[in-house]
Image (cartoon, grey):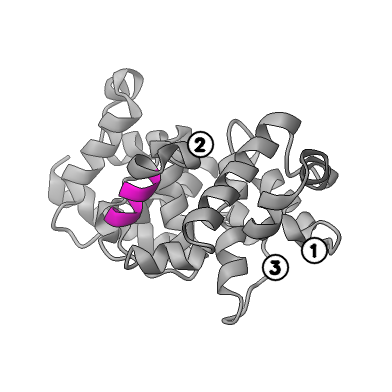
């Protein structure tokens, strides 16, 4: 299949996703409090900190736990980086465990605290991080994946960082510059969808690294007006729902 045909099919798939034609398309991150315009910092913390605990977990359960934790007034302060940074280990651990937000007591508590401390000690708030980076994806990437990498455990990894950047834009209310440089996050469903579209072959799916899959998508969509990360949700749901939508 040639490039123009694949890109056309990408546009068809994007429209189908937007029209709800791919089947169940409720994202895990839809489990959120529904922040208003005056809750920018709360929103950024909510869509960042739980993301760093999303390793080999059911994403739907993770975000349900995040919502229960946020709605619990006795536990909500874990989403304040200043408060989380200053809590005792036992207090932070117990609040993260209360509704199942953390499932690895020591490791997840450490991750949450380290990211909170990194933000508070360098920018005070997530909002200031984005302001100081001029809402530029490439500058934020340099901060999280290079200059302060050790301060952003797991979140700095390529797969989760790119997906977090997508979530921060779609759910966090941040309009990122240079969005076209956000790489697609090739999990199992994205890879299956990539094969179905003809972006990679079945043989390439078996031997390609995730970085190689991302590179194929970047090269394919260059100049098309479609950001690679925009294809993540439609590919994910298309595969997850058994490819019920036919191109």
Pointers 1 and 3 in contact (C-beta within 8 Å) = yes
Crowdedness near tag 1: few (<14), some (14–19) or many (≥20) residues, C-alpha within 10 Å: few
SS assignment at label 2: loop
Does residue 169 appear left or right of residue 119 in this picture?
A: left
Residue at 47%, 45% in the rendered image: 236
Q: CA distance from mark 2 to mark 3?
A: 24 Å
- Which is the main secondary structure of the residues drawn in magenta? helix
Task: Tell whether position 143 is magenta.
Answer: yes
Query: Between 99 and 4, which is closer to the camera in this rendering?
Result: 99
The mark closer to the camera, 1 or 2, is: 2
Which residue in the protein does label 3 denote?
Answer: 33
Q: CA distance from mark 1 to mark 2?
A: 25 Å
Taking the image as drawn, is residue 244 in sight? no
Which quadrant would the N terminus be assigned to in this image? Answer: top left
Query: Between 82 and 18, which is closer to the camera in this rendering?
Result: 82
Which of the marked residues, 1 or 2, is nearer the chain's N terminus? 1
SS assignment at label 3: loop
Which of the marked residues, 1 or 3, is nearer the chain's N terminus? 3
SS assignment at label 1: helix
Query: Between 231 and 95, which is closer to the camera in this rendering?
Result: 95
Query: Between 153 and 6, which is closer to the camera in this rendering?
Result: 153
Which residue in the protein does label 2 denote?
Answer: 154
Magenta highlight range:
138-144
Disc marking residue 71: 1
Does residue 219 appear left or right of residue 113 in this picture?
A: left
């Amino acid at each position: 299949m040639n490039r123009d045909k694949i890109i056309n099919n990408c546009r068809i798939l994007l429209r189908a996703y937007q029209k709800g034609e791919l089947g169940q398309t409720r994202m895990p991150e839809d489990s959120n409090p529904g922040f208003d315009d005056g809750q920018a910092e709360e929103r950024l913390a909510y869509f960042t900190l739980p993301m760093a605990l999303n390793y080999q977990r059911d994403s739907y359960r993770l975000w349900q736990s995040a919502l229960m934790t946020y709605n619990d007034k006795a536990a909500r302060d874990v989403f304040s980086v200043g408060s989380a940074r200053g809590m005792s280990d036992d207090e932070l651990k117990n609040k993260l465990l209360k509704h199942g937000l953390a499932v690895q007591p020591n490791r997840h508590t450490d991750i949450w605290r380290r990211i909170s401390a990194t933000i508070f000690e360098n920018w005070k708030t997530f909002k200031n991080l984005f302001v100081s980076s001029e809402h530029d994806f490439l500058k934020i990437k340099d901060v999280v994946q290079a200059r302060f990498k050790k301060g952003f455990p797991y979140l700095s990894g390529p797969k989760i960082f790119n997906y977090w950047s997508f979530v921060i834009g779609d759910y966090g209310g941040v309009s990122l510059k240079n969005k076209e440089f956000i790489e697609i996050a090739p999990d199992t469903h994205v890879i299956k969808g990539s094969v179905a579209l003809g972006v990679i072959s079945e043989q390439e799916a078996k031997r390609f690294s995730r970085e190689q899959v991302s590179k194929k998508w970047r090269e394919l969509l260059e100049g098309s007006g479609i950001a690679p990360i925009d294809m993540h949700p439609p590919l994910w749901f298309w595969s997850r729902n058994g490819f019920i939508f036919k191109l």
